[in-house]
Image: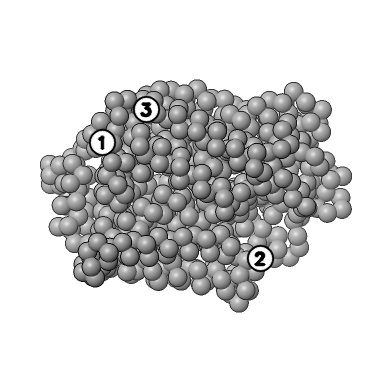
């Protein structure tokens, strides 16, 4: 039986398939294309093209998982509700923090990318470090970053119809300029000899393929596909629109990024690689790699066009993520994981308090991660962690809500294979994101949980803790601790660990660990009666449970 779209009260269903497609594509084509191909080439050289293929495939797996879930429950901020569907309120609470930490940090990353290119025009925005490959914000840069994020916030306080209209207009520009740059750089800089210069020797070359996915900006660049999922409850026809937008945006993004990486590899002057190779490639006096290449090839007009796009593309992505982040906070308010007032909708159909909340919290992420590279490493890990629950929820719902009882407008084929595979891939990417960023992430989560427990004891006594649904959420703690331990003792090149578990044995360890955690998680799923009660509270309606 067909479902009817589920939306929060006050939200408007004004977003069509093109709006959802550009919400996802606008998130994919952001700061990643400005720095990702350069960063990937530093680590993998010509093999970086494989990084983009594998990274796109990994994200496509997760995108298909979430396409099934989002069409079953087309609700804005739906990813907050997914963990509760399969494992109850405590797991949903923990995962809502993970989602919050993931989403609100995107806009700061996009702002840093804007300032990175603007640094060529206003040098006071960044301080270039000794290695010439890392930039950190100066005090003046922080001020400009705050102003840009405030602008994203103000623009998001209008009706969603106008938000998506602006996104569609920017979407054509964001797609056209990178495609134009790729074509022209390939035509003007056809240095095929660059493709024979490796980044490192022996196993180091192949390790670079995987580390580039996690720390080179590859996976980070594809994360924007979730924009359509977060706006599902505001779509005019979510059952048709969501799969097209989610899967289509990843496929288009893959084609574009592979072309950009090839263009970058071919356009670099072979003289710049003659002595130090790819791993030490820098552009002296330039902080925008594609603009620097265009200028070196005599296309100064293209360089200036790229400087303009360096403002438009990341700003558009930051703008979209401010929109989707506010929907996450709104959903948290609906489930009372955060103050319920943050789910308030104004007359324009916008969760205005949630928008402001995302602005304030986002500012704090620029303090421990004051450069694009540093914050991208963190975002990659926390976002993959947030996505990892998707395959678990999918397989749990396949058992709790079989298709004979609950219609799936879009269905992931071979879910029993692709579900575990996508969970393994998510954990590998967390592992390749390196121990330094994982220290921050795990520490932040345990600190938040400790604060939550202390608050519960103060308000409700010890019973406030013992009454929590531990049976369905306990597996999260060995999962987080286990991932940290494997990364800590992992390969020094791949994970920044102590080198006790070396490549490729670390991949085997992660795979076996992931399958074990998934088995525990599926055994801990809630009873079907509790699930059906929660679905009714989401206003999906008993008519859809036959």
Asked if residue 367 is positioned above or below residue 501 in the image, the reply reads above
> In the rendering, at what x and y percent does residue 195 appear?
76, 47
Asked if residue 200 is positioned above or below residue 403 in the image, the reply reads below
Frontmost residue, 365 versus 457: 457
Residue at left 69%, top 54%? 44
Which residue carries the number 2 mark? 493
**Left or right of 20, for residue 145:** right
> In the rendering, at what x and y percent does residue 472 appear?
27, 65
How far apart marks 1 and 3 lie (CA) works out to: 13 Å
Q: Residues within 10 Å of mark 1 (few under 14, many from 20)?
A: many
Q: Residues within 10 Å of mark 2 (few under 14, many from 20)?
A: some
Q: Is mark 2 on a helix, strand or loop?
A: loop
Compare marks 3 and 2 and give the one earlier in the sequence.
3
State if disc 2 and disc 3 touch (CB < 8 Å). Answer: no
Which quadrant would residue 114 be assigned to in this image?
top right
Residue at left 72%, top 51%? 42
> In the rendering, at what x and y percent does residue 129 appear?
74, 50
How far apart marks 3 and 2 lie (CA) works out to: 45 Å
Which residue carries the number 3 mark? 160
How far apart marks 1 and 2 lie (CA) works out to: 46 Å
């Amino acid at each position: 039986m067909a479902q009817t779209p589920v939306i929060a009260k006050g939200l408007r269903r004004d977003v069509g398939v093109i709006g959802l497609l550009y919400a996802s594509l606008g998130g994919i084509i952001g700061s990643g294309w400005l720095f990702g191909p350069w960063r990937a080439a530093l680590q993998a050289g010509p093999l970086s093209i494989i990084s983009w293929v594998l990274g796109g495939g990994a994200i496509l797996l997760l995108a298909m998982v979430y396409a099934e879930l989002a069409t079953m429950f087309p609700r804005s901020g739906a990813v907050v509700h997914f963990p509760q569907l399969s494992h109850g309120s405590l797991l949903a609470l923990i995962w809502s923090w993970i989602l919050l930490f993931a989403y609100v940090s995107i806009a700061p990353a996009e702002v840093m990318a804007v300032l990175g290119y603007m640094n060529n025009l206003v040098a006071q925005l960044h301080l270039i470090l000794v290695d010439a490959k890392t930039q950190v914000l100066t005090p003046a840069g922080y001020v400009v970053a705050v102003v840009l994020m405030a602008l994203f916030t103000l623009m998001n306080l209008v009706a969603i119809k106008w938000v998506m209209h602006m996104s569609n207009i920017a979407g054509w520009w964001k797609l056209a300029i990178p495609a134009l740059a790729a074509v022209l750089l390939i035509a003007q800089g056809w240095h095929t000899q660059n493709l024979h210069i490796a980044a490192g020797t022996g196993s180091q070359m192949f390790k670079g393929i995987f580390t580039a996915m996690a720390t080179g900006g590859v996976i980070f660049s594809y994360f924007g596909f979730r924009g359509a999922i977060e706006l599902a409850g505001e779509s005019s026809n979510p059952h048709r629109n969501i799969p097209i937008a989610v899967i289509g945006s990843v496929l288009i993004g893959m084609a574009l990024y592979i072309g950009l990486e090839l263009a970058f590899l071919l356009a670099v002057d072979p003289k710049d690689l003659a002595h130090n190779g790819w791993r030490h490639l820098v552009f002296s006096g330039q902080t925008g790699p594609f603009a620097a290449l265009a200028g070196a090839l005599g296309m100064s007009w293209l360089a200036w066009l790229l400087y303009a796009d360096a403002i438009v593309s990341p700003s558009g992505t930051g703008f979209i993520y401010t929109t989707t982040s506010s929907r996450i906070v709104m959903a948290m308010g609906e489930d009372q994981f955060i103050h319920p007032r943050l789910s308030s909708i104004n007359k324009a159909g916008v969760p205005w308090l949630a928008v402001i909340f995302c602005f304030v919290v986002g500012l704090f992420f620029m303090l421990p991660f004051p450069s694009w590279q540093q914050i991208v490493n963190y975002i990659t890990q926390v976002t993959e962690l947030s996505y990892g629950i998707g395959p678990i929820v999918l397989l749990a719902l396949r058992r709790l809500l079989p298709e004979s009882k609950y219609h799936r407008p879009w269905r992931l084929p071979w879910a029993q294979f692709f579900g575990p595979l996508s969970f393994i891939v998510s954990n590998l990417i967390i592992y390749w994101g390196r121990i330094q960023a994982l220290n921050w992430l795990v520490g932040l989560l345990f600190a938040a949980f400790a604060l939550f427990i202390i608050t519960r004891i103060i308000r409700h006594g010890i019973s406030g803790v013992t009454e929590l649904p531990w049976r369905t959420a306990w597996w999260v703690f060995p999962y987080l601790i286990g991932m940290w331990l494997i990364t800590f003792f992992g390969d020094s090149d791949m994970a920044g660990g102590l080198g006790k578990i070396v490549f490729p044995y670390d991949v085997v360890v992660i795979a076996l660990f992931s399958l074990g955690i998934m088995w525990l998680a599926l055994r801990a799923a809630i009873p079907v009666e509790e699930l059906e009660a929660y679905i009714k509270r989401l206003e999906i309606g008993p008519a859809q449970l036959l």
